[in-house]
Image: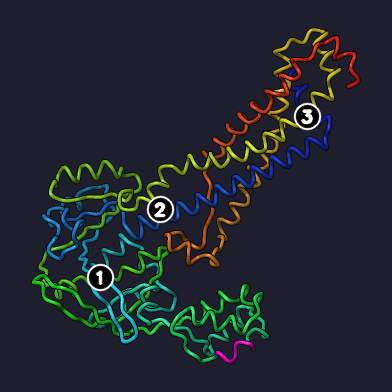
């Protein structure tokens, strides 16, 4: 009976209840969507760490971690490879030669970590080959001597990348629904080459209004990119004997990940080319990247690997990318903290509404207590009213938040306007929000707890009423 009475009491003042329900719904929707956005970002970062940058486990010579010298190769590398081939937890692994080199062109220079890879094995461990810039070459698909795959950031530093509005680029902008009046303003820039992004952006902004730059600037800049493929890059490195070696590589492809630091420091060459230049023999590698199956226990496998090969160093992805590890370990707590703050703020509105409801029903509550309703039942009725009021708004909010996440999870949210700063920290500029069912279970418990806590003050106010005085009141 108390449950039925409490539910009916919620709708006695329909307008006020609907306002509180709407506030709870909007707050819960915001919390769910914010959480989904953060989960999408975190999971994207973790996937990038595992499937692009690091893998699950990396094997090194312990001395290589302190000093990246060419001679610090992995001991027993052949035995380790045979061991990995037999383990069912290992999905794939790739042996790499890693050497620091100074890369230079006639227009610029930068330091690079050259990674000598077995192309087919590397594809099974790292998804860099999937992240080539469209129209900017292939992943070692072009025949020739000494090919190299560099990043978009490295191409900028070496001035292999430029910006130019050609006739074809102007036509593509027209197809992208850029207005003719904007294209007309850009005509003086046609076929003018700019070596850096900043110079081109400044030139575009001078021709367009602030509103036009904000709306079409990113599309104009992105479509004006031009890469000089098969450009020569001279790499200077030290071989096994300590001698300086110079070798000219030809750019065959350009990749672009979501991590600027990773892109700026890494370039890929064929393993046999780098081994020949460095004077390294068979079985001499600096790193083995290991990708495990989804069900494998990373920590357990890492421990077994170190037990069988005590002379090596084996670090898992949590140790090599502590930022991603921290997010993976503590984000669940953070999600509930966000929702907790939102519900805490909403609780004040709920308390105020229930206090008003109690004061308006002073005479009614006095009569109920006078005819025998005990304090426990009065308290339960007020508490249930509060929980019902909160739960209706929360359920609607969770449903609306889930719907928004489902839509944006397919379309993605583009933060390209601040993408450069985000990618500098390893975060993607395009985010696909996602949510798990377990999160809604936790939110439901938080909502019930909020309702219970919010009901304490109104219920105490009701219990403090004296039946005789309450009956005589005007409310």
Location of mark 3 (residue) = 10
In this rendering, the answer to whether 140 lies above or below 440 is: below
The residue under the point 24% across, 60% down is 94
What number of labels is visible? 3
Helix, strand or loop at label 2? It is helix
Residue 320 position in % (x across, y down): 30, 53
Question: What is the quadrant of residue 144 in the picture?
Answer: bottom left
Q: Is residue 223 above or below residue 44?
A: below
Q: Which sits earlier in the primary sequence, circle 3 or circle 1?
A: 3
Residue range (magenta): 185-189
Query: Residue pushed farthest left?
Result: 241
Residue drawn at x 64%, y 76% is 210
Nearer the viewer's eye, disc 3 or disc 1? 1
Most foreground residue, 112 or 36: 112
The coloring applied to the image is rainbow
179 sits to left or right of 147: right
> Which residue position is annotated with label 1?
114
Quadrant of the drawing holding the C terminus: top right
Which circle's residue, 3 or 2, is located before the other in the chain?
Answer: 3
* Residue beneath disc 2: 46
User: Which comes sooner in the sequence, label 2 or label 1?
Assistant: 2
Residue 167 percent across, percent down from the top left: 54, 90
Under circle 3, the secondary element is helix
Magenta includes 187? yes
Look at the image and say whether residue 136 sits in the magenta stretch. Answer: no
Residue at horizontal 20%, vertical 66%? 97
Residue 388 relative to residue 74: left or right? right
Label 3: how many Cα within 10 Å (few below 14, some 14–19, many 20+): many
């Amino acid at each position: 009976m108390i449950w039925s009475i409490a539910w009916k009491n919620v709708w006695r003042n329909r307008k006020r209840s609907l306002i509180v329900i709407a506030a709870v719904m909007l707050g819960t929707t915001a919390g769910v969507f914010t959480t989904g956005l953060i989960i999408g970002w975190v999971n994207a970062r973790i996937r990038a760490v595992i499937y692009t940058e690091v893998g699950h486990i990396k094997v090194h010579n312990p001395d290589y971690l302190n000093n990246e010298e060419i001679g610090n190769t992995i001991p027993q590398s052949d035995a380790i490879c045979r061991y990995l081939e037999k383990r069912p937890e290992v999905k794939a692994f790739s042996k790499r030669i890693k050497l620091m080199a100074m890369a230079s062109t006639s227009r610029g220079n930068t330091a690079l970590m050259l990674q000598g890879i077995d192309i087919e094995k590397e594809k099974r461990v790292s998804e860099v080959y999937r992240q080539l810039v469209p129209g900017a070459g292939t992943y070692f698909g072009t025949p020739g001597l000494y090919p190299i795959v560099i990043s978009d950031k490295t191409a900028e530093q070496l001035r292999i990348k430029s910006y130019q509005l050609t006739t074809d680029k102007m036509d593509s902008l027209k197809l992208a629904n850029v207005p003719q009046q904007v294209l007309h303003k850009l005509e003086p820039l046609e076929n003018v080459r700019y070596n850096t992004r900043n110079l081109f952006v400044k030139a575009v902004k001078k021709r367009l209004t602030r509103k036009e730059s904000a709306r079409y600037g990113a599309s104009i800049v992105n479509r004006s990119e031009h890469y000089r493929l098969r450009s020569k890059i001279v790499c200077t490195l030290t071989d096994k004997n300590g001698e300086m070696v110079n070798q000219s590589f030809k750019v065959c492809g350009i990749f672009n990940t979501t991590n600027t630091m990773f892109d700026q420091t890494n370039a890929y060459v064929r393993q046999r080319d780098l081994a020949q230049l460095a004077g390294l023999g068979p079985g001499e590698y600096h790193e083995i990247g290991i990708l495990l199956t989804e069900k494998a226990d990373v920590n357990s496998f890492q421990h077994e690997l170190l037990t069988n090969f005590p002379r090596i160093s084996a670090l898992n992805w949590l140790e090599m990318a502590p930022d991603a590890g921290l997010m993976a370990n503590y984000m669940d707590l953070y999600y509930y903290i966000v929702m907790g703050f939102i519900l805490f703020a909403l609780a004040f509105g709920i308390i105020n509404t229930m206090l008003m409801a109690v004061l308006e029903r002073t005479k009614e509550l006095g009569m109920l207590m006078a005819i025998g309703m005990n304090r426990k039942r009065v308290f339960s009725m007020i508490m249930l009213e509060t929980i019902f009021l909160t739960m209706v708004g929360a359920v609607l909010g969770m449903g609306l938040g889930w719907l928004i996440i489902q839509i944006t999870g397919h379309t993605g949210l583009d933060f390209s306007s601040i993408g450069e700063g985000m990618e500098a920290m390893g975060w993607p500029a395009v985010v696909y929000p996602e949510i798990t069912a377990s999160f809604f279970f936790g939110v439901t418990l938080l909502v019930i707890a909020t309702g219970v806590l919010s009901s304490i003050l109104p219920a105490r106010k009701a219990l403090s009423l004296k039946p005789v005085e309450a009956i005589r009141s005007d409310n």
